[in-house]
Amino acid sequence: MTRSLPLALAALAAASLPVLALAQAAPAPATAPAPAAFTLAPLPYAADALEPVIDAQTMTIHHGKHHQAYVDNLNKAVAADPALAGMKLEALVARAGTLPAAIRNNAGGHWNHTFFWETMAPVDKVGAISPALANAIDAQFGSMDKFKAAFKAAGTARFGSGWVWLIVGEDGKLAITSTPNQDNPLMDVAEVKGTPVLGNDVWEHAYYLKHQNRRGDYLDGWWQVVDWGKVSERYAAASS
Ligand code: MN3
């Protein structure tokens, strides 16, 4: 006697066999390879648009080689661990300390550089700072000049490679902080956590072709291409 399909399924379930096995018995449809989880967005301006503050060759190598490598290596690291499939970049960054170093470094590298490109604009296109952010900087640091001096001090004091940040801390106040390598203040491992509103890359690859060892010169000139309009938008979102 031939059993009906529902009965056969019930028998399979009763035997604790995975019902999925039935579906897998059918020929799998031909599918294209899954698209890479993460992709490199084009620069939001031409590679020479930040000249003379950041030279075109530095921009081209920094975006097309360094940032591309973080994206490629992040995709490889995620593909090697099925538990991470489909996770958003922000989720990987938030739990970086619990994940392999390849994820921490390359997810951080991808997030940080995307944030960095969007922090800047050509000198004649940077937006104005909002009164709310200008007032908060004055209240926290004394003045814009004092803030810039403290930001430069944190950037030059970072030993080796890393980043210097202006964040809205967990107390809602502005703070300057610095992270090593490709860590950032959103990571569970950050010494000082918060929401970045401004960040500068102090890896040598960000400035060496133009400034060689003079990181301070790079940090001084960089203010000319900081898009305070964008930074103010982030501040409004982080402090609302
Ligand atoms: Mn970099």
Image (cartoon, grey):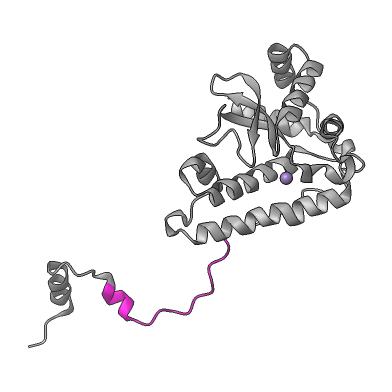
Q: Quadrant of residue 200?
A: top right
> x, y percentage for residue 70?
65, 53
Report the magenta residues as a range: 21-37
The residue closer to the viewer here, 206 or 123, is 206
The residue closer to the viewer here, 6 or 33, is 33
The residue closer to the viewer here, 185 or 124, is 185
- Give the residue at the far right of this rendering: 52
Q: Was residue 40 drawn as part of the magenta stretch in this picture?
A: no
> x, y percentage for residue 33?
54, 72
Query: In the shown orientation, is residue 107 left or right of residue 113?
Result: left
- Give the residue at the far bottom of this rendering: 1
> x, y percentage for residue 184?
61, 36
Quadrant containing the C terminus in the rendered view: top right
Residue name at image x 71 percent, y 37 percent: 160
Predominant secondary structure, magenta span:
loop
> x, y percentage for residue 198?
70, 32
Residue name at image x 54 percent, y 48 percent: 101
Q: In this view, does 225 lie above or below 85?
A: above
Report whether residue 37 is seen.
no
Report whether residue 153 is seen.
yes
Query: In the shown orientation, is residue 92 left or right of residue 153?
Result: left
Q: Was residue 27 drawn as part of the magenta stretch in this picture?
A: yes
Query: In the shown orientation, is residue 225 left or right of residue 151?
Result: right
Residue name at image x 60 percent, y 39 percent: 183
Q: Quadrant of residue 6?
A: bottom left
Query: Which of the four quarters of the rendered structure image does ligand 1 lie in?
Result: top right
Q: How many marks?
A: 0
The residue closer to the viewer here, 174 or 240, is 174
Quadrant containing the N terminus in the rendered view: bottom left
Q: In this view, does 70 lie above or below 135?
A: below
